[in-house]
Image (cartoon, helix red, strand yellow):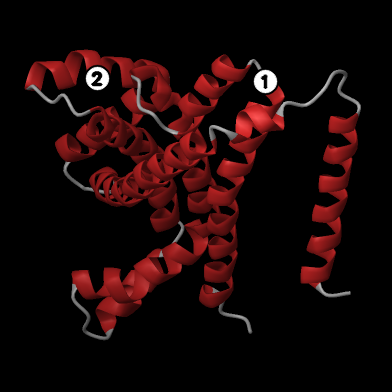
Amino acid sequence: MSRSLAHGIVAAAFVGLLVLACMQVPGEWNWAGVWEYRQKFLQGWLVTLGISLAALVLSLAIGLVVALLLAAHNPLIEATGRMYVELIRGTPLLVQLLLGFYVVANAVGLENRFVVGTLVLAAFSGAYMAEIFRGGLDAIPKTQRDSAKAIGLTRWQSFRLVVLPQAIRLVLPAVAGQLVSLIKDSSLLSVIAISELTLNAQEVNSFTYSTLESYLPLAVGYLLLTLPLSAASRWLEAAFRYER
């Protein structure tokens, strides 16, 4: 049996169990009422997609820069990176969103909720990315750098051509997991009144009083974002694998 067929069978079984569970829910379904707000779901999904993509790119850049700070030989630079990581990882994202929008953004005159939400989300995920990247870089044996130096490569060339490709292969699963978490964490942007998918689903629920019918499309919407990301991660893992 091929792996794709096995995945299809298991996915069909899960969907079947979900349908059976929904059929046992007492009362009548109100899909017609929720369907009237399909445009609202689509708009919220597109907002979530846009914010997530921007935060993904920014968090990867932040994580790489902070990882280099953590690996610096200068104690002051290393301490700066460490303080950032511990401060972000030690406080809830919800608190960071509220402080970021109502305190920091207000102090600098930044009123765009989408920009603030994207930056806070990227900064939050970037701290975790930094530790993932740092672990990947530390896992590369020092002999690899010494060998690169022995054949005449500069420090930057050895990092770009020898260390980084190996580190990427090691950190791909953890990075993919963090990116999926970032997409799901974007649901908290509703606390600063960003009309993303979760907030719009909550509003549809309040309009129609149909809780399950409002939140099932919400789950499907996030799956449409996270499943392709997981598939892309597995493809990249296979592409970077040495053994063929």
Q: CA distance from mark 2 to mark 1?
A: 31 Å
**Outermost residue toward the left in this view:** 108
Place of residue 148 in the rendered image (x, y in percent of width and height, measured from the top left): 30, 78
Which residue is painted at 27% across and 45% down in the image? 62
Q: Quadrant of residue 102?
A: top left
User: According to the image, label 1 marks what residue?
Assistant: 210
Place of residue 1 in the rendered image (x, y in percent of width and height, measured from the top left): 89, 74
Along the horizontal axis of the image, is 94 left or right of 8?
left
* Secondary structure type for disc 2: helix
Which residue is painted at 42% across and 32% down in the image? 196
Residue 108's mark? Answer: none
Q: Quadrant of residue 207?
A: top right
User: According to the image, label 2 marks what residue?
Assistant: 101
The image shows residue 240, relative to residue 90, as above or below, that is: below
- Amino acid carrying mark 2 in the image: Phe
The image shows residue 30, relative to residue 240, as above or below, that is: above
